[in-house]
Image: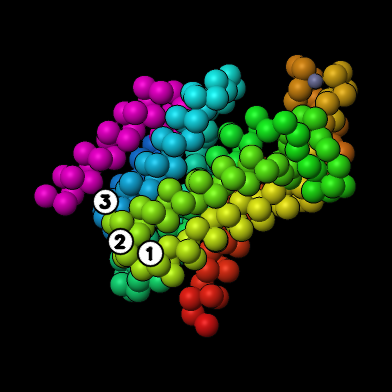
Amino acid sequence: MKLFICLSLTLIFMFITYVRKSITPRGIITGGIITFGLAYYGGIPMFLMIFLFYIVDKIFSIITDDQSDDQRNEIQILSNTLIPYVCVLLYAYYKNDILIILASAGFAECLADTLSSTIGKHAKYHICLRNLKRDENELSGDVSVLGILASLFGALIISFTYYELINPNFFHFVLITVLGVVGAFIDSVLGAFVQNKYQCSKCKKIVEEKRHCNRKTKKISGFLFIDNSTVNFLSVLITVVIGMIILIL
Ligand SMILES: [Zn+2]
């Protein structure tokens, strides 16, 4: 019965992402495997968290009339969900509740971070963390008041899910919320200081892509291979490690 429910939930999830065209085909399969594992080993609350992570961001993209129809690929899916997924797999084996709190904190960070960019890009102005100056076009590593409020909202959605469906513990609720917001801020710091940035030789814009205006861009800052997905992965990892230190000490 459990297997049947989890398979059905996973297929519904895959079907929605397929119809919405929000994820590439390989991303849908990767997301399906992760979703099934989360539902099977973590139960309905964990399924709900990954579902909310996709859906809430999509809803806000539609509300804010976000025209960019970038599809998420399997690397972007994994960079966000792999660590919560591993926490849930470890929970299935060790049955330690701390792992569920950490998985929730990981998702809180993911949703906080996505919402801070989806909603935050509509802020009147952004502050670049590198030089604390106003930035016109929003890039990874830029922060805004609207973005920070959006990240708080994103983290609250997950911590509230935890509180209502897993454990009505106020300390855990606050911890997951704070970790989500702090994690999203760490993401911005990494985005500002270590993520690769490029300059378009045609329009002179600073961008995050290797190509712009149909031509190769020139790298102007950042480390080796660190792109947006690496930054996402690292910020979830750091969030979970901070949570682990707080919960174990
Ligand atoms: Zn350009």
Read off the residue under disc 2. Answer: 166
List x then y, in percent, for residue 102.
45, 64
Secondary structure under badge 3? Answer: helix
**Residue 174 versus residue 117 in the image, above or below:** below
**Type of the residue with mark 1:** Ile
Read off the residue under disc 1. Answer: 100
**Residue 101 versus residue 125 in the image, above or below:** below
Name the mark on residue 167.
none
1 and 2 marks in contact (CB < 8 Å) = yes
Secondary structure under badge 1? Answer: helix
Front tag of 3 and 2: 2
Residue that sits furthest to the left in the current view:
1
Secondary structure under badge 2? Answer: loop
Confirm whether residue 26 shows in the render.
no
Q: Main secondary structure of the magenta part?
A: helix
The question of residue 7 being in magenta is answered with yes
Q: Nearer the viewer, residue 15 or 135?
A: 135
Earlier in the chain: of badge 3 and badge 1, it is 3
**What are the residue bounds of the magenta stretch?**
1-28
Name the mark on residue 44.
3
